[in-house]
Structures are given as C-alpha cells and as structure tokens.
Image: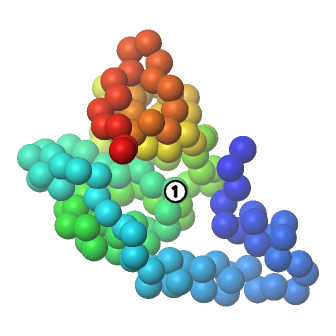
Amino acid sequence: MPLQGKDLIRRFGGSGLDLAAELKGIEAAEIADLDGVVAIAGIADFVKRLAPGSWAIVTSAPRALAVKRLEAVGVPLPQIMVAAEDVTCGKPDPEGFLKGADLLGVPIEACLVFEDSPAGVAAARASGARVAIVGDCVEAGEHEPVLYRYP
C-alpha cells in the first residue's frame, strides 16, 4: 500500500524530526520545481468544455502543489478539488473519490474517473465509479476505456 509523505518521514526520518516542518519543506521544494511538469495532451481544452461545477479533481497531492502545477500547464482550476489534506486515507483507498462525488452532489456510480496511476485506478475502481485509464499505468478492465498511450 502506498505511503503518504508523513508516513515516510515517520518511518525513515529518524526520531526528533519536526514532522510538520519536514512536510512543509518537501511541499515547498515540490512547488518550486516545475521542471518536467506537462499537461496530458488535450486536457486543458477538454476541461474548458465542461460545465463549471460539474467536475472535480481528486488528487493525492497537497492542494497548494496541485494548484501550482495545474496553473503551470494551463489547466483551469475546478470549483471542487479533493486534495491530500481533505482525506484521512489516500489512494488506493476510495475515500477521495467518494468525497468528490458527494461534493458534486451525485452518486459515485454516475461519475467517470480519469486516472493515470495504479493507486488512482485502484481507488476509482473501489469507489464504484466508472474508470477511464489515461496512459498505460495498469491494464484496463473489460469495460474500461484507455484514452491515451504515452510514447
């Protein structure tokens, strides 16, 4: 099961570390480093066509990092975002997707989740949402479309 940053610091950082300060430092370093951050082809145009408030982003990243990266690649920010600090269990736990559906005011079964990571696909499947796999991170299930293959 994937570990969150706080779990890794606790496990490997040794005693005497200030967990909050360490996490803040890691997040600041990630926010400052935008090298190699690119949008999936066509995503900005796609979300611009969606009705405001009809879609959400559920991310394992802290909100500040997610916002910075979305802005850096020109992807519009959603009205609804579920970030790392909004859940007690990260992906592959379905909590984030269930919370996102709740905030959208729709049943999870009515949601289509676009995912590009193994933990995210597992979380989306466990939530009961329909899943569209972006890239080749995992094998698609029988009724799961694969929308984009990375070179």
- The quarter of the rendered structure image containing the N terminus is top right
Residue under the image location 88 percent in, 86 percent down? 16
Q: Which of 40 and 55 is in front in this view?
A: 40
- The quarter of the rendered structure image containing the C terminus is top left
- Horizontal side of 146 relative to 79 (left or right) equals right
SS class, disc 1: loop
Identify which amino acid the numbered label 1 is placed on.
Answer: Ser
Residue under the image location 39 percent in, 76 percent down? 34
Q: Where is residue 2 in the image (x, y as percent from the top left)?
A: 68, 50
Residue 87, above or below 8: above
Residue lying furthest right? 15
- Horizontal side of 11 relative to 53 (left or right) equals right
Residue under the image location 81 percent in, 85 percent down? 17
Q: In which quarter of the image is residue 99?
A: top left
Q: Where is residue 21 in the image (x, y as percent from the top left)?
A: 67, 87
Q: Where is mark 1, residue-wise?
A: 60
Q: Where is residue 120 in the image (x, y as percent from the top left)?
A: 51, 42
